[in-house]
Amino acid sequence: MAAIWAFWKSDTWGGRSWAFMVFLSIMVLHSLAILLFTRGFLLTRTELSQYSQCSDVFESPCFPPYDQNVNNSNRARGCWTKPAVGRLVIILLDALRFDFVAPSTFYAVKKPWMDKLQVIHELASKHPSTARIFKAIADPPTTSLQRLKGLTTGGLPTFIDVGNSFGAPAIVEDNFIHQLVQNGKRVVMMGDDTWLQLFPHHFNVSYPFPSFNVKDLHTVDDGCIKNLLPTLYKEDWDVLIAHFLGVDHAGHIFGVDSSPMIEKLEQYNEILKKVVEVLESQSSPGDLHENTMLLVMGDHGQTLNGDHGGGSAEEVETSIFALSLKKPPTSAPAAFDNSTCQLDMQGRRICFSSIQQLDFAVTVSALLGLPFPFGSIGHVNSELFALAAGTWSLEKLAIHDRQSLSELDEWMQNYVNVLCINSWQVKKYIDVYSSLSLIGFSDKDLLHVSELYAQAQELWSLTSESSVVHENESSFTLPAVKRQLEAYSAFLASVASLARSNWTEFNLKLMGIGFCIMLLSLVLHAFSIKRLDNLCGHHSPSCGNSRNSFGMIFACIAVLTRACSFLSNSYILEEGRVASFLLATTAMLQLRCAIMKKMMLLEALLFVFLLPFLRISIELAQLKQAVSSLFLKMDPLRTPGINEDSQFWMSITQFVPILALVIVGYLLYKSIGCYSCHGILKYVIVGSLSNFMLIAIYWACNSDLLNLPMVPRGLKGNLIPRIIYAVGVVQVSFLSIVLLLVRETTVNLKESTVIKVLAVLSTWSSTIIVLSGKQGPLAVLALLIGGWCIIRLMRLEQNTENKYSGSSHFYALPVTQWSLLAVCMFFSTGHWCAFDGLRYAAAFIGFDEFNLIRQAILLTIDTFGFSHIFPIFGLPFLVACCYPLRQNKRLFSMQLCQVYLMYGLITAVSVTFTILCVTIQRRHLMVWGLFAPKFVFDVVGLVLADVMICLSSLYYIV
Amino acid sequence: MISSSQWREVIGVITLTGELSNLVARCSNFTPGYTQLGDRKDQKTLEKLRAESTRRKLDGGEKEKTAEYKSFRNKKRPRFMHITSKAETLRLIWIVEASVVILLYSLFRLNPDKCSYSRAVVGALLGLPAGAIVNALGAIVLGAPVGLQHFRKTVHWSLLMSVFTLVPAASVFGSSWTDWHRIFAQTKPIGPVDYMICLPAHGAVIGAWFGAWPMPLDWERSWQDWPICVTYGAIVGYLAGMMASFGFVVFKNWRQHVKGD
């Protein structure tokens, strides 16, 4: 650091090492900031692919529900627990707010949508021991997919569930549906087809209905209703899931306070009434639904506007209503009853209790006697568990056969045993997770959790031993059981809170520190630009005047406008068009300036008319994005329709890229003719020319139009791309040899720099063109024309305000234009800031088999080729092309350094705003869909840009 | 003393401003043919908006709208933002505005001795399509949608912009290139007429530029379509320019008056 400080302080230009140190320190700051911010922001959780097995329970210290020895003979006796419920009917009402279910007397004001599900109130007041309303608390993100995942796995899904299913939503973790299937239960599903995406092969019978159309309130519900009642009479299932979507859709379209919503709720009331009637009519002993449980539940709530996804109380509070058709002997012990009761409008006493959605999977598994899902961190809920009669009328636990215990004590023992298994399973998951995952829990937390578990276990061994020893005495007393329960609950609660803090809460402190470091780097950046300005002023008396020019002001406005636009998701979606709008504005201003000065008219016009083409290609790329994107609304008619099937267009699309390639090659060829070239560099450029020829041959061979029959297979396949990559690698090594060995002392700086830049660009161009396919040469041509125009148009300012040449004011506008052009190129070559915006096909040009590192490199080159590699390595053109020949070398390097600093600053400013934006919008509905991918792309781009700036400072600055 | 010609200018500016604001109000607020009045139609548009919102989906199974949409959905929408037949409305505005502008500005033609009133009017009429082409090209470069279904809207919009920007200059300067250059490239207006041409024209262009800003936002309002909000921006900018030029004229007159004393 001291060395850097010395560089700052000194009045002299330190040359290449100074520049390199500055760029390096900026890069280090950026990486540090990004690292810290990412740690706080991108919540990650590793999906484990372990599954709980039936026999695992014998590893636990708890009492198994049956003897190990009779394991195989008597499967029906259950697996980890005794099955308490024979059949289960789950009616899932999407976006069920808690106040749809709870009586309106719990609220200060009765709203029109309350008290509509009367059948639930009636049941809950009539049979408090078999029917109960629960307030279910969901964990954000409260979107259906994440919630269904959470409900079935008993875990906390988060942004990045690192697993082996990249993209496909099917659940790979252990879950309750999987356990049902594994243990021979038959599952029937009807309603929302999301279930089929999550569980493609699990259901015996399924009646999926499309959930895509929000406007459609009835298709899914009507489909459910049509199939639900007949299915209830059938015997061929054990678990029935009916997922109704109407309330969710009504909320999205009309909001909660609307007549369609009330109609929907009334309709549901009718359906539920019918379902309960059917179930009750069949519930006498020996009948179909003798031991059935009905669960009516929501997956998440919704706001009054009908939105959900965030963590507000309205969104996370949903409801579970449970009805057991077999009456348990007494109701749950008062010790566990923490319900709130109130009289409703008709004077009936209605109670509700609370439950975490996290606990749903494990509780239902315990009721059905299934192994608990491996990744579940829930806690078997006592009240829901107590509702099922099966948990009471147990034959005695395997080792107890005392008659003296009251029913309540018996139930308590059973429950303690279930909790014991529960805690053992959670502890096992935590241990496996922390040993396998990428980012585990902190050691301190783990230690704390382990201590709690050890305490509980110690207590357990004491009580269970004593109960074995004193078989006839009631040593398994209530106080001991209670202590035991408390110990287990403490353990489970601490695990749940630990998991919540790791998987659903942002670490704001880390994020803040990262952001502050980013700001610091911006200050450093600006400071070094200022300093270089002063140095430059020392060296040539003609420059250094710091009067603000128009170009400077407009450049600042453009950069800041673009940066601020990231605060809105709409502008992020339209980022390419925003950039082209700003670029076009600068172009128009320059055109005006050109008319004013009556010079460079042609260049200005050319630049202005290049931009519509860029924009149209951006729109075409957006069209492609709209197909896969869930957010982007795109009017397909916005862009002129081209009938792609016609023969004419086919031949055009085959022919034009090759023509463009020929033009690019010709320009390159002419350019080496113009300059007296250095030996090695000349060979490098010639190598690129030969690569271009290979690319043309490659495309011609693969073309459908020509359909050459005689082409050997090798030419059609992977040979040519591989040769091109190899030549590219050789060229790069040549360039580094030039850097290391040749210390030329040419007088003509301008020429040598231009040649160097040409060599580097041509090296990259062949690889990038072959990766980006047919659009490649066109994009290169557009970039060339755009860059040339920007360079030529610099003259406009140079000639009139000669004073400025050399200071940052002079370069501000061209560098801004350069970076805007780079952004436009990113979008117009068919990329966008989302993971589906990566062109995966590009990674397999030249290779058929997958190799992570190789394919990642190719994909990176394709993604950032036009937006980072070309613009950054081409930046010295700005300085070299309009540099008066006689000025000194020192000033030249300083200006080069200045230009790179400014380019870096522009990139860093927009990334800083992206970071600010994701911090502000971290609870936004689209944070994972839109802001986070944008953040990832920007951050990767910034680091790449920093690396490339460092390399070019080594290479170009003399 | 204020000369009679200066009075004429002042009156001209006032008439023009009043006429235009009146026109805008008429077209957007009270003309039944061009605006939404019935609640039934309003309901239909609402449904269309909702149909569009169905495409916003999250995570495969989720039906979402954005925060912006959320915050704006429940606000009461001013009805004047709701123009159904955009091209026709624009046509009405530009025809009325063009007749007023051409007839008025031709009074102030540069050298009335050489150039007759009718000649100035003809020059302005020739300038109208030429200016429209320039404006349309500029808009397309900046990002206006291209395509057949936008063609009529773009034509009428660019004619309106032409009336705002180039037509006054065409009727006053005719084909005097130096004056054109002075006003539009160098922005150096001298007399009151120059101000009346220069400031509103620049105001209209800048207003239109800013008017394009809300277009990408996903509020799903009909006024965000091309070219409604751009036109609003242009009109606001034009009126601001008018006010400013009026202020300049009055200020200069006052200065002269004081000096004269």
Image: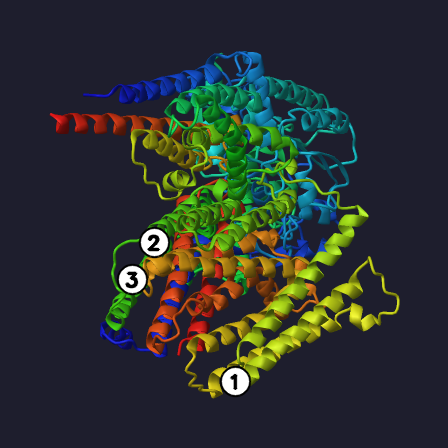
Q: Chain of mark 2?
A: A
- Which residue lies at the image location 49% right of the left edge and 29% below the top edge? B123
Q: How many marks?
A: 3
Q: Which sits in the foreground, B90 or A230?
A: B90
Q: Which residue type does callout 1 highlight?
A: Ile
Calculate the distance from the C-alpha at mark 3 to the C-alpha at mark 2.
Answer: 14 Å
- Which residue lies at the image location 64% right of the left edge and 22% below the top edge? A272
Secondary element at image label 1: helix
Q: Chain of mark 1?
A: A
Give coordinates of residue A453: x percent, y percent. 46, 56
Q: Which residue is mark 3?
A: A803
Secondary element at image label 3: helix
- Which residue lies at the image location 25% right of the left edge and 76% below the top edge? A12
- Which residue lies at the image location 54% right of the left edge and 11% below the top edge? B38
Q: Nearer the viewer, mark 1 or mark 2?
A: 2
Q: Which residue type does callout 2 highlight?
A: Met
Mark 2 Cα within 10 Å, few/some/many (few <14, many 20+)?
some
Q: Which sits in the foreground, B169 or A248?
A: B169
Which quarter of the rendered picture does the N terminus of chain A lie within?
bottom left
- Looking at the image, the residue that sits furthest to the right is A709
Q: Earlier in the sequence, mark 1 or mark 2?
A: 2
Q: Quadrant of residue A541?
A: bottom left
Q: Which residue is mark 2?
A: A552
- Looking at the image, the residue that sits furthest to the front is B114
Confirm or deny contact between disc 1 and disc 2 (CB under 8 A): no
Say whether mark 2 and mark 1 are on the same chain: yes
Calculate the distance from the C-alpha at mark 1 to the C-alpha at mark 2.
Answer: 39 Å
Q: Earlier in the sequence, mark 3 or mark 1?
A: 1
Secondary element at image label 2: helix
Q: Which residue is mark 1?
A: A737
Calculate the distance from the C-alpha at mark 3 to the C-alpha at mark 1.
Answer: 39 Å
Instruction: Give the numbered dot on residue B12.
Output: none
